[in-house]
Image (cartoon, grey):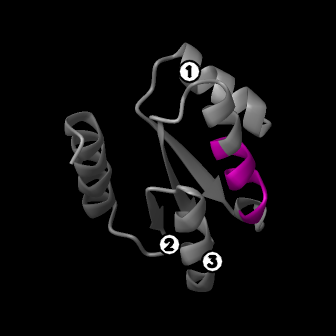
Amino acid sequence: FETPAEVARAAIENDVHVVGVSSQAAGHKTLVPQLIEELAKAGGSDILVVCGGVIPPQDYPALEEVGVAAVFGPGTNIPAAAERVIDLIRAARTGS
């Protein structure tokens, strides 16, 4: 329940690799692009953003266009999602 600017600041201050956003009420359409913008403004464009929750599949492409690294919808297999996030971190660190 933080603003995009607060999340971006905390992510940078804590030197995280990934920010996970859980959306239950369509906040992903406005808050996630704002978060990515705030991360970029604060020098954290290398921080990955992933989303999960009740996100309609038709919204996935728009999220990916603004820079979301992965979207995990309802019913996502948790170990598979964790493996995907680890793969994304590895790829980001090696530049591939």
**89 up-or-down from 80: above or below:** above
Residue at which label 1 appears: 12
C-alpha distance separating marks 3 and 2: 11 Å
- Write down the residue under mark 3: 59
Secondary structure mainly formed by the magenta segment: helix
Position of 78 with respect to 31 (left or right) is left
Outermost residue toward the bottom in this view? 58
Please determine whether, in this image, residue 47 is positioned above or below residue 29: above
In percent of the image, x 43 and y 75: which residue is there?
75
- Placement of 22 over or under 5, stated as above or below: below
Residue at left offset 65%, top offset 24%: 42
Q: Would residue 52 be counted in the magenta stretch? A: no
In this view, the residue in front, 55 or 95, is: 95
Please give the name of the residue rendered at 62% of the width and 34% of the height, measured from the top-left corner: 39
Nearer-N-terminus badge (2/1) = 1
> Which quarter of the image is occupied by the N terminus?
top right
Q: Amino acid at mark 2?
A: Gly
Report which residue position mark 2 lands on: 73
Q: Callout 3, which amino acid?
A: Asp
Q: Amino acid at mark 1?
A: Ile
User: At numbered mark 3, what does the secondary structure look like: helix, strand or loop?
Assistant: helix
- Please state which of the two labelled residues, at mark 2 or mark 1, is closer to the viewer: 1
Q: Is residue 32 magenta?
A: yes
Q: Which residues are magenta?
A: 29-36
Mark 1 → mark 3, Cα distance in angstroms:
27 Å
| Camera-side residue of 24 and 37 | 37
Tell which circle, 3 or 2, labels the residue nearer the N-terminal end. 3
Residue 77, position in %: x, y?
32, 68
